[in-house]
Image (cartoon, rainbow, N blue to C red):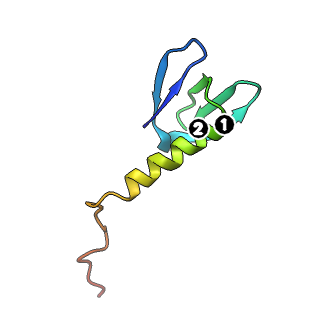
Amino acid sequence: MIKLEKLNGTLVVVNAELIESVESAPDTVINLATGNRFLVKDPVDSVIAKVIEYKKKVYAAKNVVNPLEGFERK
């Protein structure tokens, strides 16, 4: 989840995994896979940086489970 600021100044927390596209027109538009759209004050580069930081944290977790671990090929 990433924190963004809507145009009216309120905080919105968005599931970074659902972001399909980010547009700059002139405000930043976040399009989600669910069909929802958010207009935010954060510039596109800032949104991208937040998504990258989120994914680094998620995929660097120490307790990541390998779904193939213990799988024996027959």
**Residue occupying the point 30% across, 85% down:** 73
Classify the position of the N terminus by image quarter.
Answer: top left
Question: Which amino acid type corresponds to the residue marked 1 in the rendered image?
Answer: Val
Contact between marks 1 and 2 (CB within 8 A): the answer is yes
Residue at label 2?
47
Q: Give the alpha-carbon distance from disc 1 to disc 2, as whole Å.
A: 5 Å
**Looking at the image, which is closer to me, 50 or 39?**
50
Classify the position of the C terminus by image quarter.
Answer: bottom left
Q: Which residue lies furthest to the right in this view?
A: 26
Residue at label 1?
44
Residue 28, quarter of the rendered image: top right
Question: Which amino acid type corresponds to the residue marked 2 in the rendered image?
Answer: Val
Residue 23, quarter of the rendered image: top right
**Looking at the image, which is closer to me, 33 or 40?**
40
Q: How crowded is mark 1: few (under 14 residues within 10 Å), some or many (20 or more)?
A: some
Q: Position of residue 26 (x, y in %)?
A: 76, 25
